[in-house]
Amino acid sequence: MNQEYIQTPSPNFDERTLPVTMLVLHYTGMPDAPSAINWMANPESKVSAHYVVTEDGQIVQMVDEDKRAWHAGRSHWRGITNVNSASIGIEIVNPGHEWGYRPFPQEQMDALVPLISDIVKRYAIAPANIVGHSDIAPARKQDPGELFDWPLLARLGLALPIPDGQLVDPYWSDSGFYLALERFGYDISDGEAATRAFQRRFRTHTIDGMVDGECRAILFALLLERDRENGSAS
């Protein structure tokens, strides 16, 4: 599917030092699309993204994919700390938790899905590396948040599905859960924040940062599935 992009170049980019292996989804967290786009086009902001997807489904390209956009900030995922260099960043227009967080419109998701699909195919990005900003910066960020339709992406093979069926609680201690969360990819320097980010992504009905049996069981299932995909039994 060929999509037309509105070109609004941002000066906020530099050269990559890593190959693209990740896709990071954000919400803009500003009152409206013009505010967000203008801010990322402002050299004083020192922030940018490769793409912005508006609520009515327009796609704005701000940085060429071969350049490093400045969207991730201080972040970490699966041992990668220079996430900007290793990722494509997409900002999804939404006021966010500060300005009146709300569901993402169908028109927006209808534009976002083929954009993600195209990027994933071109760079062979694994579903486990299609992440939210809160996944890579759990102590700082909440986006794209608990209202984002991760299950839709998962049904299309564009994100990890939330485990269901017969889940088994491995009865890890809290410290054991944090170590498993680190093995999965999260920065656990703030264990409660990392747990909250995990819940925001995989257990949205209760986001309290507390380790419980349901969280343990979901994470255990995710790790088992990843090990099966990797041909590992560890």
Image (cartoon, rainbow, N blue to C red):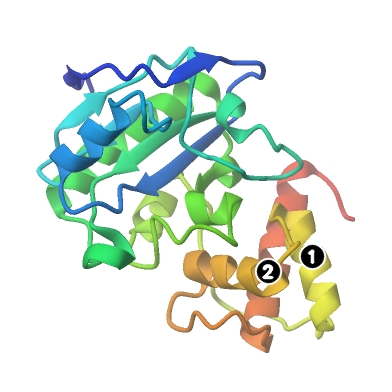
Q: Residue at x 33, y 40 (%)?
A: 91
On screen, residue 109 above or below 11: below
Secondary structure under tag 2 reads helix
Residue 219's label in the rendered image is 2
- The residue wearing badge 1 is 180
Looking at the rendered structure, the kind of residue marked 1 is Ala
The image position of residue 97, as x and y in percent, is 32, 66
Marks 1 and 2 close (CB-CB < 8 Å): yes
Counting residues from the start of the chain, the first of labels 1 and 2 encountered is 1
Whether residue 104 is visible to the viewer of this picture, yes or no, is yes
Looking at the rendered structure, the kind of residue marked 2 is Leu
Give the quarter of the image for residue 195.
Answer: bottom right
| Disc 1 residue crowd, few under 14, some 14–19, many 20+, Cα 10 Å | some
184 on left or right of 193:
right
Q: Nearer the viewer, residue 73 or 213?
A: 73
Secondary structure under tag 1 reads helix
Q: Which residue is drawn at 48% across and 14% down?
A: 67
The image position of residue 135, as x and y in percent, is 56, 55
Whether residue 163 is visible to the viewer of this picture, yes or no, is no
Could you tell me which quadrant the N terminus lies in? Answer: top left
On screen, residue 74 above or below 6: below
Q: Nearer the viewer, residue 182 or 44?
A: 44
Give the quarter of the image for residue 45.
Answer: top left
The image position of residue 37, as x and y in percent, is 23, 33
> Which residue is situated farthest in the right direction here?
234
Could you tell me which quadrant the C terminus lies in? Answer: bottom right
Q: Which of 133 and 9 is in front in this view?
A: 9
The image position of residue 60, as x and y in percent, is 22, 27
On screen, residue 6 above or below 53: above
Spatial CA span between label 1 and label 2: 8 Å
Q: Which of 5 and 16 is in front in this view?
A: 16
